[in-house]
Amino acid sequence: MDPVTAMYVAQGMHGLAYGMILFLLASGLTLIFGMMGILNLAHATFFMLSAYLCYQVIAWTGSFWLALLIAPIVTGIIGVLLERFLLRKVHAFGHIGELILTVGVSLVILESVKVFWGTESLPVQIPNVLQGLVTAGGLDYPIYRLFIIGLSLVILIVLMLILYKTRLGMVVRAAVSDADMVDALGINVPLVFMLVFGVGTWMAGVAGVAIAPILTVFPGLADQVGMDAFIVVVVGGFGSLGGALLVAIICGLLNSYGVQFVSQLAPVLMYIFMAIVLVFKPMGLFGERE
Amino acid sequence: MKGKKWLLSIVVVVCCIALLGLSPAMGAKSKFDPSKMGDMSDLDLSNPVIPTGDTIKIAIVASFSGPAAAVGDIYFASVQSVAHDYNKRGGILVDGKKKLVQVIKANHESKVPIAKKVSERMVLQEKVDVLWGTNGSHLMKVINQVADKYKTIAVSAAAVSDELYDAQNFSRYSFMTSISTSQVGRGMAYYYGQVRKKETKFYILCQDYLFGHSIAGGFKAGLKEYYPDAELVGEDYHKLFLTDFAPYLTKVKAAGAEVVYTGDWIPDAANLLVQARQMGLDLPFANLFINNPPFLQQVGIEGTDGLVHIGQIGSDGKAFKTEGQIKYYKAWNDQYPKWKKPFDTTTYEHGTGTIGAYRMQTYWLLDVIERAGSTDPEKIIKVWENDTWEDVNGTVYKMRGIDHKTERDLFIELYVPPEQQKESMNIEPYYWFKDCSNTGPSYKLPADKVTPVMDPKLKDIRKGS
Amino acid sequence: MMNKMLKWILWLAGFVFLILYPKLFGIYYSNVFVTFAIFALYATSYNLLLGYTGLLSFGHAMFFGTGAYGTALALTHISGFPLIPALLAGALAAAILALILCPIMVRVGGTAFAMLHLAFGGLMYVLALKLRHITGGEDGIGGFDIPPFSIPGIVSFDMTDPLQFFYFAMVVLIGSIWILWFFTKTPFGQIMIAVRDNAKRVDYLGFRVPQTKAVIYVFSGAFCGVAGAVYALFQNLISAEDGFHVMTSFAPIMLTMVGGIGSFFGPIFGSAIFGILEELTTRYTERVELVFGLVLIFVIMFAPMGFVGTVKMIKEKWFTRQGV
C-alpha cells in the first residue's frame, strides 16, 4: 500500500472504531426507547461512570480485564436500580417526565463522580497484550483499536443471537412491538423491562471501559459521545438495532473522512446527515412506531 | 530671555538624564524578595486560613465545577499561597491601615452568563478589589467588561489571547500579567528557527476557538519572522473536548510533519498526546499546556520524552542559583506532603511551572498594591502602568503602559527522562518527577525577541486619555 | 366587581414594585431580575407550544439563539443601528427561521417533532460553532455597542447603564409576556387549546389544524427570539454555547415542569424558582449541579404538576376541608 492509500484505510478504520463505540452506547439507548419508550438522557452518564469505575477497579486490582468485567456490571446494577425505583414511577408523565428525571439523575451522578474522584484527568493504561501496533501492507494500526472493533462485534453477535434465537429474545422483541399484548399473555413485562434496562446500561458500561484507555477519564468524558450516540439512535430509528449499527458506522466514517477532507466542517456533516434523513423519514431510517 | 530659554533646556536635559538614570534603579527596587517571606510552615492549602472583615479582597473567577473544575483549584492554590505569605507578614499597608488579603472563590462554571453574574456579584456585593481570572478567553472577556463597567481592577493571569487587549476589548482596569499567544508563537518559532535549527516541517493542531486560532496565528507570524525556511505541512482546528483525535493524527502522520505545534490544554492535550503515542506517532509536541504532572506520569517517561514546552517562568539552565530561590521553593514543597484532596496530586508537588507563574503574577499584583499604598483602582493603575518588577528567578516583568501586556523573557524547556533532569533540578533529589520526562535543558528567549503584539489602534486611543 | 378591583390593585402594586425594585435591591439584583425575566419570557413562549398544543420541542434554543445572533450581528455590522430595530431584527430572524421550518414541523407530532427539533437545534449549534468568521464560534460575538433607546429630539436613555437597561428590559419582556397572555385569551387561543385536547374535532369543526399549529409555532419562535435578543443586549455577548446548546433547549422544559405545566404562569414561577435557587446555591456550594439534579428528581417524583399545580392542589384540599 502506498502511504496515501494507507492513510485512507487508516481513516476508515478510525471511523469504524469510533462507530463501534457509538454503537455500543446507542444500542442500549435504542433498545430502552424502542421497548419502554423511555428517553434516557442519563445513558451517556452511565458510560462516564463506568469509565471511572474501570479506573477504580484497576487502581485496586491492577487488572484491566477485571475492570472490563466488573465496571459494566456495577453500572448495569445502578441502571436497574434507577429503572426500578425512579423511572418506573414517572413513566405515567410521558417523555417530559423521563426527560426531567434522567437529566436530574445525570447531574447527580456527574457531581457524585467529582466528589469521589476529583476533577483531574485520571489515567487508564492499555493492558500489555493490547499495546503496540499491527503492521500489515504498509499500514500501522493500534492493536487496541482493533480490539474495540472486535469486542463490539462479539457483543453485537451475542445480542443478535439472544434476540433472535432465544425465547427471551422473542419476548423482548414482542414487547418492543406491543407491550400490552405481551403483558396480557401473562409475561412479567416489568421484569423484562428491568432486564432490558440493565443490559442497555451494561452495554454503555462496556463502551465506557473500552474507551477509558483511549481517553483520559475526566468529568466531561461523555458530553460529545453521548450526543453522537443520541444522533445515531434518532437517525437509525428508535428501537432498531440494525439501524443503530448502520448509522453508527456511517457517523464514524463521516467523522474520520470529514476530518480528512473538510476538516473545519467535519462536525457539521453528522448533523446535516441527521437533518436530511429526518426531513424525509421523521421516525429515522428504520423506525416505524410513533 | 534667550539666555533663560537656554538655561531651561539644560535643566530639562539634566532632569531627563536623572530620570533615565533613576528608572532602572527604581526598577531594581521592586522585586520579589524571598528574605521578606513570612513563615510558611503552616501553609495548608486543604485547610486554608482565610481572613475576613476589612481586608484586601481578591476574587478568583474560575471554574470550580464542570469539565474544567481542576483549574479552579490550581488558581486557588497559587493565589492563596501568596495571600498566606502576605498575611503572615502582617498584611499590606493600604489607605493608612494594615490589611490582610482575603481570597474568594467565584465559580463561573465555564459559562459566560454565570461569569458575568458572578463577577458582578463579586464587585457589587462582596466589594472585591481585584478580579483574578481565568481559563477561557471568552470568560476573561466578560470579566474585563465587568471590571471596566464597575471600575475594578482585573488581572488576566491565565487567559492568554492577545485579542483580549486589542483596541476593541481593551480596558484600562484590566492587566494581562500572563504570557500572550503572540509571545508563545514567536517564542516557539524563535527557538526552532534561531536556536535549534533542526526540524523544518511543522503541523499546527489547535482548538477551534479564539485562543486556538490566536496561538496558531502567533506561531505562523513567528515562523515568517524567525524561520522563513520552515514549512507548514498542515493546519487543523479541532472542536473543544474532542473524543477521537485519531483522524487528525493520521493526517499529521501522512503529512510527514516533524513537529506538532499545539496550544491544546487538558483534557484535549492529554487525549491528543495519549492517542498519538498509542498510534505510534513519536513526534515532539511543541506546546504550552502539556505540562500537567499527573498526566505526564500517565503517559510515562518514554511518551513524554522530547516534548518541547514554552513557559513564562523558568531559568536559563539550572533552576536554583540562589539561596533565596531554594527558600522560596521549599516554602511550598516542604508543606506539600501534608496537603489533602484535591491538593495531594503531583500537580501541586513543586509549586513551579504553571503554578509558579500564577504565584509570581500574584506577588507582582500584591507588590503593586503595596507600592500604590491603596486599593484605589486609579492609584493601582498609576503604579502598574510601565512598572518593572523582578520575579524570584531574576526575570524582569514590564507592564506595557499602552496595552497592559507584559514584556518578559520566556523559557523553552526540553523534556527528558528523570536521570537527565538534574540539568534543571539541581538540588535533592535531582529530578522533578521520577516516573515521567520533565524539564532538563532549558533556554531563555530574550524579552525583546518575544514581545507581545500591540494593536496599533490602541496608541491613538490611549493618547487621548 | 370587588374581584376586578382587587386585580387592578394587584397589578398596580406589581407595577410600583417593579419601578422601585432597583432602588430597593441595587444593581446586582436588578441584573438577576433581568436574567429571570428573560428566561421567563423564553419559557413562556416555549410553553405556548408545549402547554397549549402539546408539542414537545428539544430544539427551541435555535429560536432563542437566532434571536440573539440576529440582534448581535445587526449591531456588530451596521454602525449606528438603533435599539428597537436591532431588537426587532432578532425577533424577525427567529420568526423567519420558524417560518422556514414550519412546513416540515407541522406535519409531524410526538417523538418525531421532538427529534426533528433536536436535529435542527444540533445543526444550528455546530454551524454556530464552526462558522466562526460569522458567529465568532466558541467565543461568540460580543463587545458590540449597545445603542441608546432614543426618540430623536425627545429622550435618550443610555442602555449601558444597568438601571436604565433594567427598565427597558422590563418593558420589553413583560410587554411580550402580556402579548402572549392576551393571545391565549383570543378566540384563536381557544382553538389552540382545542387542538391540543382534540385535534380531530377541531378539524371537523372546519378549522385548519396544521395552519393553526403553524401560526402558534411561528409566534412561539418569534417571542423566543425576543428573549434571545434581549439576552444578547443584556450580556453584550452571545456564543454558540449560550445560544444554541442543547441545554439551552432543555432549560425552558425544566422551567415549565418545575413551575407547573399547563398553566400560563407556570414557566414564570419556574424561572423564578430556578433563579432563587441558583442565587442561594452558588453562594454556599460549588455543587450547584447536584442541587439542580436533586430538585429535578424531587419535583418529578413528588410534585409532578410543578409549583402551580401543587399550590392549586393544596388550595383545593384546603377549600374542600373548609367546605366540610
Image (cartoon, rainbow, N blue to C red):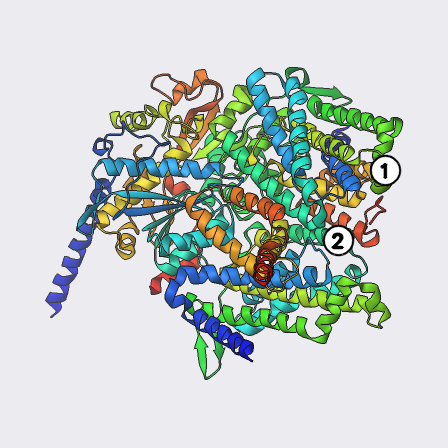
- Residue C53 position, x and y percent, is 73, 62
Q: Is residue C288 above or below residue A156?
A: below
Q: Which residue shows up at 66% across the image and 50% down it?
A: C126
**Marking on residue A134:** none
Q: Chain of mark 2?
A: C
**Which of the two marks, 1 or 2, is nearer to us in this view?**
1
Residue closest to the eye, C187 or C110: C187
Question: Which element carries disc 1, helix, strand or loop?
Answer: helix
The residue at which mark 2 appears reads as C116
**Labels 1, 2: one chain:** no
> Which quarter of the figure is the N terminus of chain A placed in?
top right
- Residue A23 position, x and y percent, is 75, 34
Question: Which element carries disc 2, helix, strand or loop?
Answer: helix
Left or right of B211 in this view: B177 = left
Total marks drawn? 2
Q: Is residue A251 above or below residue A165?
A: below
Instruction: Tell me the kind of residue under disc 2.
Output: Leu
The residue at which mark 1 appears reads as A182
Q: Which residue shows up at 40% across the image and 27% down it?
A: B340
Q: Which residue shows up at 51% across the image and 26% down it?
A: B296
Instruction: Tell me the kind of residue under disc 1.
Output: Val
